[in-house]
Amino acid sequence: MVNSEEWASGSFHFRRKLNDVRAIRVTTDNVRDVAKWCGGEELKTPSAMGERYVAQPLHPILNIPTLTEFPLQAYHGNWVVKGEDGKFSIMENKIFVEEYEVNPDRNPTISFPEGVR
């Protein structure tokens, strides 16, 4: 079984109906790794103590480039999903856990941890 630290920093296989995707839930702790994985740019919010990550609902912490001039913006707790076509999308946690399940054929030792659903 995967512990909460491994869960927070790992990219695992999930499936939606018949589609297998890779996904990572974005947090202020893993945003740099997620940015590298999806070719995105980590965002920092100015604060009194200099620039740091701020986990607030109205502040995105990650930009993901698209083919348009506007990047996708991920917020703390969102999922970055890489589809079978290699394209990235952003999903809110509530929607992701309702529509996806851990793919046991690809990840036999993990399940959604407490507090994610």
Image: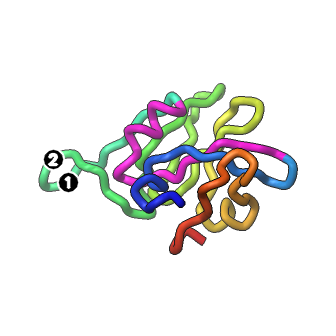
**Amino acid type assigned to the residue bearing label 1 in the image:** Ser
Name the secondary structure under disc 1. Answer: strand
Q: Is residue 56 above or below residue 43?
A: below
Q: Which residue is at a point 79% across and 53% down the rendered structure image?
A: 16
User: Is the residue marked by circle 2 packed among few (<14), some (14-19), or many (20+) residues within 10 Å?
Assistant: few
Q: Position of residue 112 (x, y in %)?
A: 59, 64
Circle 2/circle 1 CB separation < 8 Å: yes
Q: Which residue is mark 1?
A: 47
Q: Is residue 64 above or below residue 6?
A: above
Q: Which residue is at a point 58% across and 28% down the rendered structure image?
A: 69
Asked if residue 85 lies in the magenta stretch, the reply is no
Residues at marks 2 and 1, CA–CA distance in whole angstroms: 5 Å
User: Is the residue marked by circle 1 packed among few (<14), some (14-19), or many (20+) residues within 10 Å?
Assistant: few
Q: Position of residue 64 (x, y in %)?
A: 53, 36
Q: In terms of depth relative to the viewer, which is nearer, 3 or 33?
A: 3
Would residue 66 be found to the left or right of residue 64 on screen? right
Would residue 48 be found to the left or right of residue 23 on screen? left
Would residue 74 be found to the left or right of residue 84 on screen? left
Judged from this view, the residue extending furthest toward the left is: 49
**Amino acid type assigned to the residue bearing label 2 in the image:** Gly
Q: Which residue is at a point 55% across and 36% down the rendered structure image?
A: 71
Tell me the quarter of the image containing the C terminus.
Answer: bottom right
Magenta span? 19-38
Q: Which residue is mark 2?
A: 50
Tell me the quarter of the image containing the N terminus.
Answer: bottom right
